[in-house]
Image (cartoon, coloured by chain):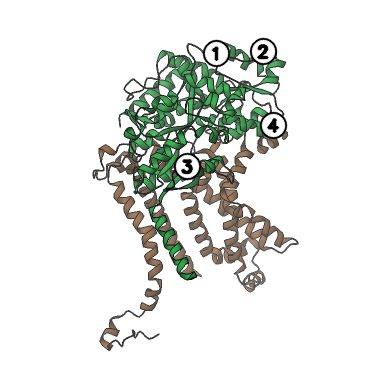
Chain colours: A brown, B green
């Protein structure tokens, strides 16, 4: 490409332009929009987290309080609880969705009659709107009318209906099952695409070399799939870490904060306690945690790309 | 010539449009619909006030879909001119300073409305809105179950003991005597019992908790004794948080009684049209009491059209409210609803609710009360229900928690 600007730039001016400048110009509008919708709120939230801001106490004003909000949040037992709930929520979701997704992807990558149909069916949870899915699951979990209780009672596992979402020791498991059911198809689609990109000759030559199926999986499939696995894991982590809807619509973080993740706590602090200073402080902490995760995953991804 | 005429007409239209005041009004989505009554009311209002154009903007009812977007918009200097709000949100908005003080316009109209709803538009001695519709909690009961068990039908003046006996007798053969929205810990249903025993939620100045009193505890112990009995209340009630769930359980004979306002009539009728049931006042102890619910009209503090906004408020809370609310099976907060509204005068169940309005009370207008309820009282109830905690210890803890919140 030649970098002459209209109107005839002198050679001297031409040299100052970096070689990639047309690309920069082309992405500039998108970058500006991103800065506007992501950068600006982020900076505003950070500034807000350094001020006292209690909506129902306008007479207190909004004085600068440094890291007071952060100190209060970090000392709160509710925050520590929600940190732990977020860890459980994200890690079990990640493990469940990745394992199930990989397993089903491997199955759907084999040739068998009705494969196209099976692939279509597997996508259903993903295309159901999340609100519809959550409300359906809520009825399935219902202690009186729920189909899950009805099955378990027929099997003789329980005698009376259990309110799966209403007890502190079962609520997290119940929301996790719904979330893994909903999120697995996405991982599955990505991994299936990754599997199909592995050249068949490689598998064949491994067979000729005498590799058994486990060895072929471990030393051919997995290395080839690694970049896809890392991307899928990164996206799943971000989606579940930030997920608000499925927990909020099923339990609102309850009972007794048993499913109160950081996003739920942020919402409650902002719109139940109307404490915007502390709520944005929790938001900023959440952002930092997620940022660190994504940075680690990002390095893994680059490494995996280099290896293949 | 034709062209000239058209230009003149367009200019005239433009002139008229610029003199026109646009009033953006948020209403609950449940009040909208192609032939919804509020559209006729708005048309009548615009006929009387030709300089005002009312834009009704239906918005999904709910804290996160209606209340929070308004808070965010109003904090940013925007939002609708006027909005319909839940009575629980009015004091919060007043404390935030995002709705208009209406003392001057409102004057001495307080006597035109029932006391309970009136108290919900009053914040620190000033008026911040006008009452719109109202309701009170009553006891829905399964008439067939009562008759088959040989129990007298609940009526005016039935007592806590009558209620306990009824719950115990009706809890049999797969039926439970009582049901409630347990996902909220049951505090919503508990308020009336608490007041009937003579309890007060907050001290007189409204700044410290008073619910851990002897009278309060009497009600709390009685109420939780029933709720924690697995034969009286179904396990499933722990997750019930909506009227559809309660209405379905009631109409299918799973629960024999539950507390709800007039909105429950529609829920039950939709669930089972031929089902025999009635509504009674809540059982009493020392005094009658019920919980007020409903909605108010408030004006955004940012509005550029305070005059038009007030005219709308005055119109929709005036006599025009009676026929309009007939279209929604709702009772007006304006005095006279018992006789002026056809749905009330023609339906004995609605009359039961109307009769309870005199003793119905609203939750405290201290905007921190919601936090006390959600973060202190509900967890205390749940600790008793889910973890078997001691009521007295749980309520003492709730009191400490409330002191912490109210001292912000």
User: Which residue is most to the front?
Assistant: B1
**Chain name for mark 4:** B
- CA–CA distance in space, label 1 to label 2: 15 Å
Where disc 3 sits, the SS reads helix
Mark closest to the chain's N terminus, 1 or 2: 2
Mark closest to the chain's N terminus, 3 or 2: 3
Q: Nearer the viewer, mark 1 or mark 4?
A: 4
Where disc 2 sits, the SS reads loop
- CA–CA distance in space, label 1 to label 4: 29 Å
Name the mark on residue B228.
none
Q: Which residue is mark 3?
A: B45
Q: Which residue is mark 1?
A: B160
Instruction: Establish whether labels 3 and 2 are both on one chain.
Output: yes
Q: Which residue is mark 2?
A: B151
Check disc 1: other Cα within 10 Å, few if <14, some if 14-19, many if 20+.
some
Check disc 4: other Cα within 10 Å, few if <14, some if 14-19, many if 20+.
some
Q: Which residue is mark 4?
A: B272
């Amino acid at each position: 490409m030649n970098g002459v600007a209209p109107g005839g730039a002198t050679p001297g001016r031409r040299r100052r332009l970096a070689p990639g400048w047309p690309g920069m110009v082309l992405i500039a509008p998108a970058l500006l929009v991103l800065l506007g919708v992501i950068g600006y709120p982020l900076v505003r939230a950070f500034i807000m987290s350094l001020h006292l801001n209690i909506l129902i106490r306008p007479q207190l004003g909004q004085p600068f309080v440094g890291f007071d909000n952060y100190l209060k949040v970090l000392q709160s037992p509710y925050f520590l609880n929600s940190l732990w709930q977020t860890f459980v929520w994200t890690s079990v979701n990640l493990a469940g969705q990745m394992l199930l997704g990989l397993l089903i992807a491997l199955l759907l990558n084999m040739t068998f009659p009705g494969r196209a149909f099976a692939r279509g069916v597997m996508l259903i949870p993903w295309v159901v709107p999340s609100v519809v899915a959550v409300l359906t699951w809520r009825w399935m979990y219902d202690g009186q009318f729920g189909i899950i209780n009805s099955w378990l009672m027929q099997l003789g596992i329980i005698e009376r209906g259990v309110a799966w979402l209403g007890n502190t020791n079962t609520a997290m498991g119940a929301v996790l099952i719904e979330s893994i059911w909903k999120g697995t198809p996405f991982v599955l689609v990505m991994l299936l695409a990754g599997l199909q990109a592995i050249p068949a000759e490689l598998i064949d030559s491994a067979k000729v070399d005498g590799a058994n199926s486990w060895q072929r999986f471990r030393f051919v499939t997995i290395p080839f799939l690694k970049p896809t696995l890392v991307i899928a894991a990164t996206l799943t982590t971000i989606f579940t870490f930030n997920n608000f809807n499925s927990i909020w619509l099923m339990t609102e973080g309850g009972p007794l904060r048993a499913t109160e993740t950081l996003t739920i706590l942020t919402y409650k602090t902002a719109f139940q306690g109307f404490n915007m200073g502390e709520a944005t402080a929790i938001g900023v902490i959440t952002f930092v945690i997620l940022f660190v995760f994504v940075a680690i995953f990002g390095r893994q991804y680059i490494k995996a790309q280099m290896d293949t | 010539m034709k062209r000239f005429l058209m230009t003149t007409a367009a200019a005239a239209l433009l002139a008229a449009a610029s003199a026109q005041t646009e009033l953006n009004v948020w209403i609950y989505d449940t009040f909208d619909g192609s032939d919804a009554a509020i559209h006729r009311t708005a048309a009548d209002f615009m006929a009387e006030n030709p300089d005002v154009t009312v834009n009704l903007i239906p918005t999904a009812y709910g804290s996160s879909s209606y209340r929070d977007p308004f808070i965010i918009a109003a904090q940013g200097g925007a939002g609708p001119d006027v909005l319909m709000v839940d009575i629980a949100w009015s004091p919060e908005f007043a404390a935030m300073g995002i709705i208009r003080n209406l003392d001057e316009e409102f004057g001495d109209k307080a006597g035109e409305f029932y006391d309970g709803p009136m108290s919900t538009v009053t914040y620190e001695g000033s008026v911040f809105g006008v009452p719109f519709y109202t309701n009170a909690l009553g006891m829905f009961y399964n008439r067939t179950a009562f008759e088959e068990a040989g129990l007298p039908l609940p009526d005016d003046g039935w007592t806590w003991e009558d209620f306990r006996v009824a719950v115990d007798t009706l809890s049999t053969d797969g039926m439970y005597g009582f049901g409630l929205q347990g996902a909220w810990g049951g505090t919503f249903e508990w308020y009336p019992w608490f007041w009937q025993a003579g309890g007060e939620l907050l001290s007189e100045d409204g700044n410290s908790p008073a619910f851990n009193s002897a009278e309060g505890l009497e009600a709390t112990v009685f109420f939780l004794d029933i709720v924690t009995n697995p034969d009286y209340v179904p396990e499933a009630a722990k997750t019930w948080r909506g009227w559809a769930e309660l209405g379905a359980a009631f109409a299918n004979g799973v629960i024999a009684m539950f507390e709800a306002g007039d909105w429950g009539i529609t829920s039950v009728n939709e669930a089972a049209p031929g089902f025999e049931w009635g509504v009674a006042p809540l059982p009493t102890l020392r005094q009658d009491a019920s919980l007020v619910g409903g909605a108010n009209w408030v004006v955004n503090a940012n509005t550029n059209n305070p005059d038009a906004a007030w005219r709308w408020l005055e119109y929709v809370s005036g006599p025009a409210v009676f026929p309009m609310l007939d279209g929604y099976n709702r009772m007006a907060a304006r005095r006279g609803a018992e006789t002026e509204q056809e749905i009330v005068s023609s339906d004995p169940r609605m009359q039961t609710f109307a009769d309870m309005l005199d003793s119905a009370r609203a939750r405290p207008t201290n905007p921190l009360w919601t936090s006390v309820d959600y973060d202190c009282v509900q967890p205390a109830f749940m600790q008793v229900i889910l973890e078997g905690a001691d009521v007295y210890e749980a309520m003492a803890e709730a009191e400490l928690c409330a002191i912490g919140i109210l001292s912000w």
